[in-house]
Image (tube, helix red, strand yellow):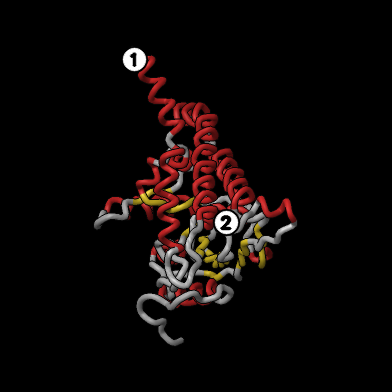
Amino acid sequence: MSATAALMALALAYAASPIIIAIPSVLQERRIWKSTPLPSLSLVGMVKVYLFNVLWMGGALVGSLLLLPKYVLGKTMGRFDCLREAHAVERFLAKMCCVCFVCPNVEIRGAENLPADDGSSPAPVYVANHSSQVDLAVVYFLERRFRWIAKDSVKFLPGVGLIMTLNEHVFIQRTGKNRKSVSNLFERSNRAIRSGLPMFFFPQGTRRMTGRLPFKDGAYTLAIDNESRLIPVSIDIPLGCWNSWYPLCLLWGGSVSNVVLTVHKPIQAREGMDKEELKRETYDAIFSVIPLIGEEVGEPKKER
């Protein structure tokens, strides 16, 4: 086999890889919904999760390849980047995945609490609960630019890793104690905040539909160090979002519950503030509008 043929075969395999790589994503989501008293994913639900991931990865692959020449030229010449275009690709795909497989719209409550997307410094820090893969799509309905904190392995997801690299999201090694990775996280996050680009955190650190995990420190350290506003966001996902026959049910007039995002009033972080108090305040705000499924996990919250 010639080198050209080998490269073409490799490119075709990479382009087709979302068809295979989407399967572990289904298993991960299925594990989340197996917890009592949640409805387990039905066959319909698993098919929708699978197609959701295939569309997300495949679309990200196409979008990132279209942007790659501009990215390479920008890095070479040092004159421009493709950050806005990369975020636009992410936003378009996120909305398409949601509208095609989850719900026809995402309801935004408290939109007046959203800070302007004007690039002012320091930029705000968004914090939200994390329940499902759905979260990663619906937050783009906020119509705000931001950067994620993602585990290092996401880099290797076809399409997704490339578009996130083009958009300069922050990757971190979550296994073991890697001081260099943590230092890089704060360095790049601080740089984004000071350049006027918000950071988006899921401070629970992992997806969970039942129970409520305590919040980790990262977002709050960043907000205090930069005296940024914390923007608590509640993500309320209908329990039947995957198992419903949406979008087919629209053909016979079936009803669909939308995902609801509630944006709470900003909380101004200041140097020297009590980190635990900030965590409690955002925790209480976020979960004030989300029904409790199961019990809180970890240490009980301290009384005010």
For label 2, the residue is: 139
Identify whether 156 is placed above or below 46.
above
Residue type at numbered disc 1: Ala
Query: How many marks overall?
Result: 2
Residue type at numbered disc 2: Val
Quadrant (top left/top right/bottom left/bottom right) for the N terminus: top left
Residue under the image location 61 percent in, 64 percent down:
261
Q: Can residue 51 be seen in this snapshot?
A: yes
* Relative to 96, 122 lies left or right: left
Which residue occupies the extreme right position in the image? 253
Mark 1 crowd level (few <14, some 14–19, many ≥20, 10 Å Cα): few
Which residue occupies the extreme top position in the image? 2
Q: Can residue 199 be seen in this snapshot?
A: no
For label 1, the residue is: 3
Give the foreground label among 2 and 1: 1
Residue 130 tag number: none
* Relative to 254, 120 lies left or right: left
The percent coordinates of residue 47 (x first, y second) are 52, 49
Identify which residue, 50 or 292, lies in the foreground.
Answer: 50
Identify which residue, 178 or 207, lies in the foreground.
Answer: 207
The percent coordinates of residue 214 (x first, y second) are 40, 72
Q: CA distance from mark 2 to mark 1?
A: 43 Å
Q: Earlier in the sequence, mark 2 or mark 1?
A: 1
Residue under the image location 50 percent in, 66 percent down:
39
